[in-house]
Amino acid sequence: GAVVSQHPSRVICKSGTSVKIECRSLDFQATTMFWYRQFPKKSLMLMATSNEGSKATYEQGVEKDKFLINHASLTLSTLTVTSAHPEDSSFYICSARELVGGYTFGSGTRLTVV
Amino acid sequence: LAKTTQPISMDSYEGQEVNITCSHNNIATNDYITWYQQFPSQGPRFIIQGYKTKVTNEVASLFIPADRKSSTLSLPRVSLSDTAVYYCLVGDKPGSSNTGKLIFGQGTTLQVKP
């Protein structure tokens, strides 16, 4: 079946630094990828939709200059949390959608900003 | 996108059948119903998808009445490892031309006890 690899699985960074999270579709081409964040005991909140070769579409309330998304190829999308602060600490999850298939989720990235 | 409503939590015991019902009164003609399972610190995992009547796979059954305003996920003979959060989502069939965003509701936390 379709596999999405997300890296790193967990990262700790200092306030003010930037962190990049990678999402790769391993055995299929993902025309669209999605980024979510999830706080403890809460549901997944969609942050943005990224399409290969074009600018990401951000959900209302999500700062596009803080959460930079790049979808340079059909198998890779990256989320960069810039100038991270403790309130950015969360669980970030990506999802990749095949053209005629379903949605496959990555295993998530636990970000802790200290 | 159709909004879904599920019970916040459910308890069960090992070996029992568990039925989780989801309400989606505003489901559109083109919408499919999909259920995902999420374990702590992991991304959601696809369980089952359907459009109408009944769908069964190796892990679950999905019952959809004729008006499609609700659906019921049935897990036969649950075990401790089925303790997780279960999400019901409705949206366009993959491959359609729209944005295809998956919006998660609150989900149902299922606790299976020994």
Image (cartoon, grey):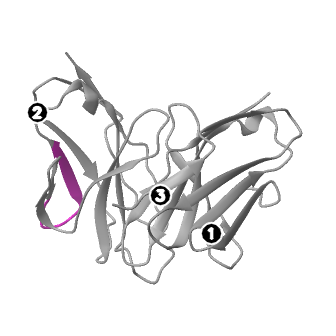
Q: CA distance from mark 2 to mark 1?
A: 39 Å
Give the residue type that dot 1 points to: Ser
Tell me what residue is drawn at x 77 percent, y 61 percent.
A64
Query: Which mark lies nearer to you, 2 or 3?
Result: 2
Nearest to N terminus: mark 2 or mark 3: 2
User: For the point 50% across and 51% down, which residue is it?
Assistant: A106
Q: Which residue is mark 2?
A: B77
Asked if B33 appears above or below A89 in the picture, the reply is below
Q: Chain of mark 3?
A: B
Quarter holding the C terminus of chain B is top left
The crowding category of the residue bearing disc 2, from other C-alpha atoms within 10 Å (few below 14, some 14 to 19, many at least 20), is few
In the image, taking residue B34 as reference, residue B95 lies left or right, namely right
Pointers 2 and 1 in contact (CB under 8 A)? no
Asked which quadrant contains residue A112, the reply is top right
Residue position marked by numbered label 3 in the rendering: B103
Q: Chain of mark 2?
A: B
Q: Which residue is mark 1?
A: A50
Q: Secondary structure at mark 2?
A: loop
Q: In this rendering, do the residues under marks 2 and 3 share a single chain?
A: yes
The quadrant of the rendering that contains the N terminus of chain B is bottom left
